Amino acid sequence: MSAPSSAERPVVTRIAPSPTGSLHIGNARSALFNWIYARHTGGKFLIRIEDTDRARHSEAAVQVIFDSLNWLGLTPDAEPVSQFARADIHRAVVGELVERGWAFRCYMTSEEADAAKAVARAEGHALRSPWRDRTPGPEQADQPFVIRFKTPMDGETVIDDRVRGVVAFPNKDLEDFVLLRTDGTPIYNLAVAVDDHDMGITHVIRGEEHLSNAGRQILIYQAMGWELPVYAHLPLLVGADGAKLSKRHGAMTVGEFIAAGYLPEAVRNYLARLGWGHGDAEIFSDAQAIEWFDLKDVVRSPARLDLVKLEHINNHYIRIADLPRLTGLVAQIHAARGLAQSEADDAVLARAISLVREAAKTLLDLAELTLFVLKKRPLALDEKTLKLLDETTRGLLGRLAAQLAAEAEWAAPPLGKALREFAESEGVGLGKIGPALRGVLSGGAPAPDLASALEALGREESLGRIADALSQVQ
């Protein structure tokens, strides 16, 4: 049993997550591919929340999904659809299927159904309900029932998947599957098929794990006489070791990627490479991805999640990011850690970020590398720095401070030259004063090279920290 599908209609794609937790990175990849393909074709990208499981439903989880998609920049072209709110429509379609002879009431108990499935397996086929061709009598009037789909006994249900190729589902392996439970609530496959049709979805782009659902959903489409969407089942995501994704592989949800300090544009760039690519291009803009993307280029083999590659891409976007935006993001991290900041601190923070961003893989790295500029005087010196501040080193730092105070330009290149010239004039290497100076300037926190640290702190703050340190140990 097969039916043609059309790719001639204006493209409409969708992402349909269940609100039972955070947005998994696999769902984020599916959302991105749907969004990119809609933009590539000039179509629409929609969101449907599959919230029929009310026992596990959470409005907070719904908001997490919206927040995650918004952070990724994957905004829909219409208001999101609630699957639960469409339950009456799902039931109405089941009524039509019954009228057309494609569905029937099944009065088997769960125990009878289990026994019938065991018999069917032994005979080499899936469950066929004894009620598919049987008319209920008066004794069934008050008995509970489910409504099942009347699956064809033979033949195949076939799709031409844009990623997997031709996939055939032998109908003997597809049971008379339930459409409505005994309480009248719709089953997942029914709701998905009806909603995809009613939303005008032309391309169902989703993870490979949903491929097994396609046969049942196509049967519903065909029974209703609806035009099939184009199916494209994306490759599985695995860890760098090739094993199924798990917590040991690192961030698994969009929220965890946010907390780890990745930029959304870096995550979009990286996710786009998981199962698709354009030649050897590793780093590309959204505009380039939209121009290049085509479903025919999506591969079948599993895509490996490699956080080392993501860090490399994230570093690229940190280096080219707008400085005020980057400053705001890093300031949020410092504030979340209880570090109060003023407008003056923001200016210092921005200056520091501009000097250290080349070395940062994540926003968390940037926060660590810029913590030293936000410390308040007088800084508490760590034990290592205190040991370095012997009488000789204190004398060197005092003379260095006087020379630095006379510098006309307070910028890393001339400051670096001044440090080298001072060490040469004193007949010592920078190794004699460098570690102590670093400790005095940073208070033991990570910091860039000495010249950059001085520029980031500014003239007054740098000289003040040196003076504070010398006064503490005399």
Image (cartoon, rainbow, N blue to C red):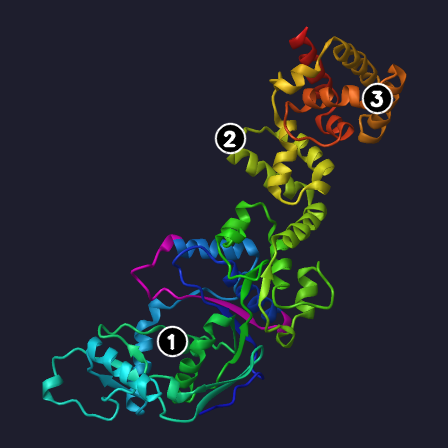
Residue 224 appears in which quarter of the rendering? bottom left
Instruction: Mark 3 or mark 2: name the one nearer the start of the chain.
Output: 2
Marks 2 and 1, the one that precedes in the sequence: 1
Separation of disc 2 and disc 1 at Cα? 48 Å
- Residue 322 vertical position relative to residue 274 in the rendered view, above or below: above
In front: 324, or 415? 415
Check if residue 57 falls in the magenta segment: yes
- The residue labelled by disc 1 is 189
Residue found at the very far front of the displayed protein: 122
- Give the amino acid type for the residue marked by disc 3 in the picture: Gly
Q: Which residues are magenta?
A: 40-60
Tell me the tag on residue 429: 3
Residue shown at the point (70%, 13%) measured from the top left: 389
Q: Position of residue 217 (x, y in %)?
A: 41, 80
Query: Would residue 96 be seen by someone viewing this image from the given angle?
Result: no
Asked whether disc 2 touches disc 1, contact meaning CB atoms under 8 Å apart, the reply is no
Query: In the displayed structure, does residue 375 sit left or right of residue 66?
Result: right
Mark 3 to mark 2 CA distance (whole Å): 39 Å
Q: Residues within 10 Å of mark 2 (few under 14, many from 20)?
A: few
Query: Which residue is at 50% across, 63% downward?
Result: 27
Q: Residues within 10 Å of mark 1 (few under 14, many from 20)?
A: some
